[in-house]
Amino acid sequence: MDDESLAEWAERRDAKIGRLRAVPLVSGDGPSGAHLHPEAARAIQRWNGHAWEPYGLASNLAEAKRIMYPEVDQPQAVPAPGHRPLGAGTGKHRKPPTKSG
């Protein structure tokens, strides 16, 4: 049997500390899929290494995603469109120089 060492297990557990999850505030038998009840309020919970603890509230799934994944809301750097001429070279993809005159 390939048991992991206690140090490896603790490292794996500690890597998950701070992870957030959104739990719909609807009646039922516990947490359900995030895609269910997208307009229902959400309880945001944070993993502390031992249990899920209250972290915040969101009015719906979209707001919960903004809280859980703030890096997605930030604008991404988009390269400016423009013509980039080819540099000098003799690769197979280059056209041979044309002779003028």
Image (spheres, rainbow, N blue to C red):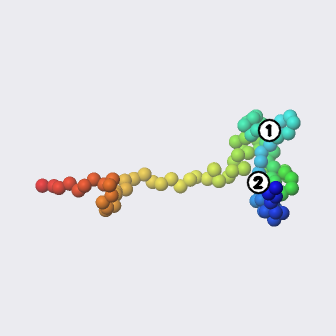
Asked where in the image residue 40 lies, by quadrant, the reply is top right
Q: Is residue 32 left or right of residue 81?
A: right
Vertical side of 45 occupied by 3: above or below: below
Front one among 19 and 43? 19
Check disc 1 and report its element: helix, strand or loop: loop
Check disc 2 and report its element: helix, strand or loop: loop
Residue 53 spot, x, y in % from top left: 85, 52
Vertical side of 32 occupied by 18: above or below: below
The residue that mark 1 highlights is 32
CB within 8 Å, label 1 to label 2: no
Label 2 sits on what residue type?
Arg
Q: Is residue 30 left or right of residue 99?
A: right
Which residue is rendered at x = 67% and y = 52% of the image?
70
Q: Is residue 74 left or right of residue 20?
A: left
Label 1 sits on what residue type?
Ser
Q: What is the quadrant of the C terminus in the image?
A: bottom left
Asked where in the image residue 64 lies, by quadrant, the reply is top right
Which residue is rendered at x = 31% and y = 62% of the image?
88
Which residue is rendered at x = 87% and y = 36% of the image?
29
